Amino acid sequence: MTNADPLLEAVRAIIERVAGPDRTPPASSADTPLADGFWLDSVELLEVLVACETEFGILLDESSVIEAGAFGTLGSLADLVRFRLAGRQP
Amino acid sequence: MSPDGAPGARIEPGMFRGPKRLDPCLPLLRRIPAPIARSFIIGLAIGDGILRKDRLRSAIAWAGAQAEGSKWPLAFALLANHGRFIADEAMIGVGDASKWPQRVRIEGRERLAALSGGAILLGFHLGPPRTAFMLRSLGIPVHLTGRLQSADRDGRWAGALQASQAVRLPAGAPRGRAEGLHHIRGLLRRGALVYLAADGPFGREAFRIDLPGGPLVARLGWFTLRRITGVPTLPVLTWQSRGGRVIAIHPPLPPPHPDAAADAESCRSALTPLVEDYVRRFRAQCRYLAFPLAP
């Protein structure tokens, strides 16, 4: 499923790159859980985070990741990236 | 099911795993002289192995696969050492985590002094437990990581856990473990020394070291952190000798290779002789190779 939000789509593409297309659910949305929807394990979650940092040229520090619940859903991770890109705290 | 919750091989339901089963007995065991309490736990571990035949069978099978020695004495030595190490985990005879009474010698400490930033101390489920605690008690400011369940059950460890800013990696919880791994990454980037287990019951396999009787399976957690951060990774092996406990800090693994598969092979090649040598010298202390740690 294509999301209207280009940033959400970019993060989804990163996840697909890390986990592989077979693990990407056909109907993912902002609410799709990363662990129970994309079936990412802890190492893959970390790899996705690092890939987001590299791709978008941002730093996602520990406290902001926890506060934003960035490992929760596709949307929460994309929102954190969005806030960092905007130079604001979540 | 997430690989974080994937069980390890050869799980024995209801097996005698450690201090948790001893919890109700601990107040009594701590009131009696420590040598007697330790002997009781060793006897319990041997008796448990005999009563639960799978455990003894695993020990005999593993012992029989070793190149030297008779399998029966080695099998019972494995069970006895399991008891000794459980007593260590339960801190029998230890009043306070900061006053660890055993004689501990560190080999290769100069390698820590040579570090200029963050580093991973890569431990193994081989030999006696509590290596990271002991390093801290000897003045090495290492951060503890892992499930830390047995430490949770003993209030005397609370101070040590707090002081070490221990990072918990909860079992079967990808999100919580990912937050823990991310925290460790931050610590390493800020120049910290972090103790991580190479092997264990959780996580996907990075590579395996084939050994007589069964492999040692290295997991992806430490391997990925090493690749992401590029920090030096120093293998640490611990054994019990007649003179006390020895913690050997080995030279760092080769720097990460850009290709993950080549990197895994590079780590495997560097670790194999260390682990093979350990198993050859301290067979009776390799309890979790004989009966792998259950999740």
Image (spheres, helix red, strand yellow):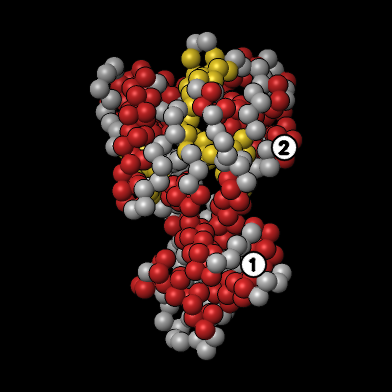
Relative to B45, B207 lies left or right? left
Q: Which mark is residue A50?
A: none
Q: Secondary structure at mark 1?
A: loop
Mark 2 Cα shell of 10 Å, populated few (<14), some (14-19), many (≥20): some
What residue does disc 1 label?
Answer: A69
Left or right of residue B205: residue B242: right
Q: Position of residue A23 (x, y in %)?
A: 39, 71
Residue B266 percent coordinates (x, y): 33, 41
Q: Is residue B90 left or right of residue B288?
A: right
Residue B153 appears in the figure: no
- Front residue of B182/B64: it is B182
Q: Chain of mark 1?
A: A
Q: What is the chain identity of the residue bearing mark 2?
A: B
Q: Between B50 and B204, which is closer to the camera in this rendering?
A: B204
Q: Amino acid at mark 1?
A: Gly
Q: Which residue is mark 2?
A: B163
Q: Answer with the quarter of the image where residue A33 lies.
A: bottom right
Residue, x 46% and y 67% (percent of image)?
A: A39
Image position, residue B80 (x, y; %): 47, 22
User: In the current view of this chain or complex, which residue is farthest to the bottom?
Assistant: A4
Label 2: element kind: helix
Q: CA distance from mark 2 to mark 1?
A: 26 Å
Percent coordinates x, y for residue B244 in the rendering: 54, 14
Image height of B67 relative to A67, above or below: above
